[in-house]
Image (cartoon, rainbow, N blue to C red):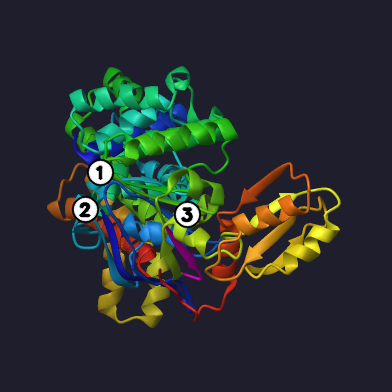
Amino acid sequence: MIETERLTRCYGTLTAVDELTIRAEPGQVLGLLGPNGAGKSTAMRMIAGFLAPSSGSARVCGHDVSREPLKAKRALGYLPEGAPSYGELTVREFLVFIIRMRGMSSDFGYRRFDEVIGRLQLEDVLEQTIDTLSKGLRRRVGLAQAILHDPPVLMLDEPTDGLDPNQKHTVRQLIDAMARERTILISTHLLEEVHALCNRVVIIAQGKLMADATPAELEARSRYHGAVSFSAPGSAVAQEMLGRLPQAAAIEVDPLDGRITVFPKPGERILEPVEVLLHQQGLEVSEIQLERGRLDEVFRQITTAPATTESRA
Amino acid sequence: MSPVVALMRRELRSFFVTPVAYVFLVIFLVLAGLLTFYSGDFYERGQADLQPFFVMHPWLYLILVPAVSMRMWAEESKGGTLELLLSLPINLVQAMLGKFLAAWLFIGLALLLTFPIWLTVNYLGSPDNGVILAGYLGSWLMAGAFLAIGACLSAVTQSQVVAFILTAVVCVLLLLAGQPEVLDFFQAALPRRLVHAVAHLSMLQHFEAIARGVLDLRDLFYFLFSILAWLGAGVLVLDLKRTP
């Protein structure tokens, strides 16, 4: 479990994290989302105990990171931004160093070592120095370091940054597999990651909490939520007819591919009337889609709105 | 294994997988030998002792110890590994201790490797080996004090070059504090007592006392206290850097 209460960090006159209160429970993958410079990494550094908060507090598994730092650190696996590691060491030396630093018994340590390098497919590079590894491999070494002691709480700062699509998929599967009995907090600015991984999302901008909701709830805030889009040739007439539908609020045509999107009025369902209308007009529609809502649009809307319009779902 | 020992082992490992250790050892051994024989008149003095060898150590350390200590924290903080290190269950005091001990042991190893000169002097005559042992102890203690200064100043900056220069400057000031030229300078500005205090800060005087074979507790305390004080200051610097 990770809890923060009015966590704040100032750098001079700049408030990097502003009274942030979040809570991640076991079994949850909480996504910390925000534009670059929103304070994601600063917040994580405070939870990891690397930075001291200006005010407020953070707890890992009930241990206050300022008052019981060692207990909190033992419960936490942390992948810092950019996955730093000691480049002059080999992968094996680095992981053995972590085992010793964490005071793991050699029995448990080496069993976990085998498990982790198997899961992250690091067997072939064990004897290579970390400096010679590709970005993706280095990130995996960083992940290995974070999960080596089988912590109940994991905190990963941009875990898939710089990975190719296959590696991203592997890492996401790994996180997914670990999520069941653990608390996982990941930061990201990739919206696809939210869909793929998170069951709860916290959006911050300028250090402030802007939204705390499930991905589906966020999508429901989108203008596109419940809208219907389709492409059909020669639909100029249909367009006019659609505009007269009592349930329709607006119609947009994509200038590039001519795809038509019909937006419903609040609380109205629009798929059925659109289908009926198209059928009546005898229009051939190759494919028609009911939109779930677009996260990128919601994200933009939330993070560019003035900071005073704080909203909580 | 205690995290102090684990960190110490990693630091030592890092010395030896990078060229730092070998460059240091070669330069230290070559210079120590050359200076002893050429500047120190090892043969011409006609005395079976290692005075000319130990007398050169403060000046060797002035260049070489900052080179060992400069990377201690500056490199970690520049490379982002400091964040990783401090997310592990270790507190700042333990981390400082682990790093310092690794570097101090390494310099101890360099000192041990000067054993041929000890063999030579024993072959040529019959020196007082107690005095030589005291010389080695004094030299190692002084290296420790230099290292502690370097550890503290390496925590101040992300730049290894800045750490090197700051350390060398502080070390030279402390070495020369007891010299008449420096004391004359202070005599004009400071009351007598303070001048006296400045003179007692001089590393050179404490080191030379030990190297002559006079094991005065006050000299030992001076070095041990210097080490602890500078390491403590280093921990304070690291702690200040993480608080807003």
**Marks 2 and 3, Cα distance to the nearest angstrom?**
39 Å
Q: Chain of mark 3?
A: B
Element type at marker 1?
loop
Element type at marker 3?
helix
**Quadrant of residue A248 within the rendered picture:** bottom right
Residue in the foreground of this view, choosing between A34 and B197: A34
**Residue pictured at 52% horizontal, 59% vertical:** A219
Residue A60 at x, y percent in the picture: 25, 55
Q: Amino acid at mark 1?
A: Pro
Decide: is A220 above or below A164.
below
Q: Main secondary structure of the magenta part?
A: strand
Residues tagged 3 and 1 counted as in contact (Cβ below 8 A): no
**Range covered by the magenta-colored residues:** A201-207
- Return the residue found at the far front: A280
Q: Quadrant of the C terminus of chain A?
A: bottom left
Which disc number belongs to residue A152? 1
Mark nearer the N terminus (1 vs 2): 2
**Marks 3 and 1, Cα distance to the nearest angstrom?**
39 Å
Q: Amino acid at mark 2?
A: Cys
**Residue pictured at 56% horizontal, 30% vertical:** A166
Residues tagged 1 and 2 counted as in contact (Cβ below 8 A): yes
Which disc number belongs to residue A61? 2
Q: Chain of mark 2?
A: A
**Residue pictured at 28% horizontal, 28% vertical:** B48
Left or right: A257, with B196 as reference point: right
> Mark 2, mark 3: which one is toward the viewer?
2
Left or right: A128, with A239 as reference point: left
